[in-house]
Amino acid sequence: MKIIYSILLIVNLNQMFSQTFEEHIVSLFALDAFYVDAADIDGDGDIDLMSASRFDDKISWYENNGIQNFTEHILTTNANHAHSVLASDLNSDGLMDIIGCSREINNIVWFENLGNHQFSEHVIVTNSFGEYVDTHDVDQDGDMDVLSASFFDSSVFWFENDGNQNFTPHLIANNATHAYSVYAIDLDGDNDIDVLSASNQDNKIAWYENNGFQEFEEHIISTNAMMAWDVEAIDVDGDHDIDVLSASSDDNKIAWYENDGNENFTEHIISNNAMYAHSVYPVDMDGDNDIDVISASMDDNKISLYENDGEQNFSEIIISNNAIIAYNAMGIDIDNDGDNDILSASGGDNKIAWYENIVEGCTNENSCNYNLNAEFDDESCIMIQDFNGNGDVNEDDILDLQDILLIIAYILNQIELNLLGCEASINNDPNIDIFDIIQIINIILN
């Protein structure tokens, strides 16, 4: 019973840790800001940003000067109802090019990076009805191909790059009703590139199996993603197969679909409180080597982070509820400080913003649980002299849950940071571990 009690106390561990985020506005002049991406566009070693905005028909990139001051460079104001933007090296010259699509003129274009902040526009396809683009070497011939979700003709395409950036369209599917999102990945582990789509009039998440010759067979993952807008894929549960995630608006849902290893998928709801959920993005945000999830939802103006406890139980952290009509969000280390930040686009305030991930922890180098990456002290430091055998770790003359939580914090930090020292122990053995927690519980109960 005492051991069970100690295990149950661990659920309160979140009292010991917190992630905070500070908003930085990049632009308030991307009219109906709709989509963002991030990459090192100018090759200077820092992360630049990109946006597509619909009401000004604009695709832009924002140059990072290295200390996160951003200068806008407009690539075009002729991308009527610009819907998507993506960075990829299409011509294999080592420079990041930029791909965009526009709904009203149905074009998918790419902007060739010529170096020195110069770009040349090229058309990949016209009359594409493209909403969303992705890139991958679909045919594995050593160059990047382009994929699109085509809204008005309910189709998914890939555009074959001949190596000289001449693109040939190939139809993957024409029954993804109001196809909106596309994502390319080897889903079944057979070393070819499969494709996923989200389509919102048939509420469908589907994947298209590549037979190795770029002939695709549809497999339905779900028809219960009500008004599906976005699809992503990654190994969420760490079992070495690819799982799938979706955002859907009519059920306010962020979900992941567990792959059993044979591409049978089981839905798990992360949240049904993302009001008019519009985007989903998986990334490890807290550096604990599991996959967390970011969402943008329009009706509650919310950017959220769902923190994975390692067992695929997700706890929501609201990053912002002031991203007015939040369309899109993603995670990447924008400030090059070793943790991932969040980038968003929101249309109601014409805003491109990034949210700096502020690491909190013990900043005392002489403590047992010193966190080298901590930017702010969270008063969780455990000093060597705290372990004096009486169980009162924080020396407040009260033996309680806080002493247990401090030991848990120390144990986790010791494992994560490989700290040495602090050999003193509550139960007088050489280690600080779960048995010290049990010893405190015994003292409390007895």
Image: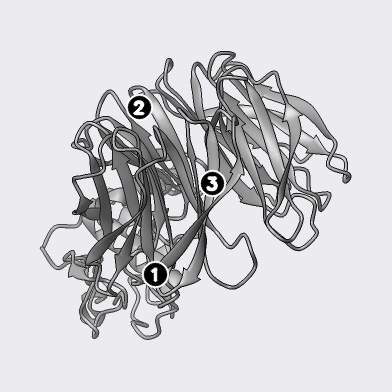
The residue that label 3 is drawn on is 109
Q: As shown in the figure, which amino acid type bears the numbered disc 2?
A: Ala
Q: As shown in the figure, which amino acid type bears the numbered disc 3?
A: Val
Of the numbered discs 2 and 1, the one sitting upstream in the chain is: 1
Q: Do the residues labelled 3 and 1 touch (CB within 8 Å)?
A: no
Q: Identify which residue, 294 or 367, lies in the foreground.
A: 294
Identify the image quadrant of residue 406: bottom left
Q: Identify which residue, 403 or 26, lies in the foreground.
A: 26
Of the numbered discs 3 and 1, the one sitting upstream in the chain is: 3
- Above or below — where is 339 with respect to 232? below
Q: Distance between the residues labelled 2 and 1?
A: 38 Å
- Above or below — where is 430 with respect to 139? below
Q: As shown in the figure, which amino acid type bears the numbered disc 1?
A: His
Q: Which of marks 2 and 1 is in front?
A: 1
Is disc 2 surrounded by few (<14), some (14 to 19) or many (20+) residues within 10 Å? Answer: many
Of the numbered discs 3 and 2, the one sitting upstream in the chain is: 3
The residue that label 1 is drawn on is 117
- Above or below — where is 289 with respect to 291? below
Badge number at residue 274: 2
Q: Which colour scheme is used?
A: one colour
For the point 17% across and 69% down, the residue is 377
For the point 65% across and 21% down, the residue is 176
